Amino acid sequence: QVQLVESGGDLVQAGGSLRLSCLASGRILTINAMGWYRQVPGKQRELVATVTSGGTTNYADSVKGRFTISRDNTKNTVYLQMNSLQPDDTGVYYCNADLRVSATFRSVVYWGQGTQVTVSS
């Protein structure tokens, strides 16, 4: 059974920084892309950043230059370094991973349970 567990969410003042982590555990054969998304009440979940297994990254325009996504393939972990945080960054942050548990089956996207980030003005 595969689990993704996020950590690092907190309450921080505007201009501050946080580092989120997401560990994928269980019977995992390979992990393709990993990513971070966020959601606020009443709105759809939105992309924050993604990173491929080869290290290619993609960012939402709103976070470019402030957030950095990275991963440690030896630990099945993806990180999100968030700097210059703004109140609009407030939300529940979810990680996901497109992974394979077996050579027989195609890859499936798994999601974590989310971690709350609150930025006060």
Image: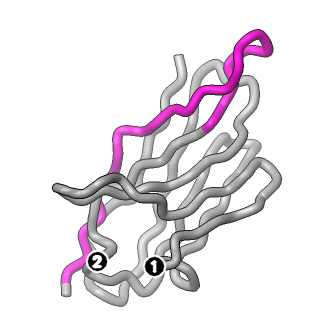
Q: How many marks?
A: 2
Q: Residue 108 in magenta?
A: yes
**Residue 88, numbered circle:** 2
Please name the residue shown 37% across and 81% down the image. Answer: 85
Q: Amino acid at mark 1?
A: Ser
Quadrant of residue 9 within the rendered picture = bottom left
107 over 83 or under it: above or below = above
Q: Position of residue 32 (x, y in %)?
A: 72, 40
How crowded pointer 1 is (Cα within 10 Å; few <14, some 14-19, many 20+) is rated as few
The magenta stretch spans which residues?
98-120
85 over 115 or under it: above or below = below
Quadrant of residue 15 within the rendered picture = bottom left
Q: Nearer the viewer, residue 83 or 45?
A: 45
**Residue 62, numbered circle:** 1
- Rounded to the nearest angstrom, the CA distance separating label 2 from label 1 is 9 Å
Quadrant of residue 71 within the rendered picture = bottom right
- C-beta proximity under 8 Å, tags 2 and 1: yes
- Judged from the image, the secondary structure of the residue bearing numbered disc 1 is loop
Q: Is residue 51 left or right of residue 89?
A: right
Q: Is residue 47 left or right of residue 16?
A: right
Q: Amino acid at mark 2?
A: Asp
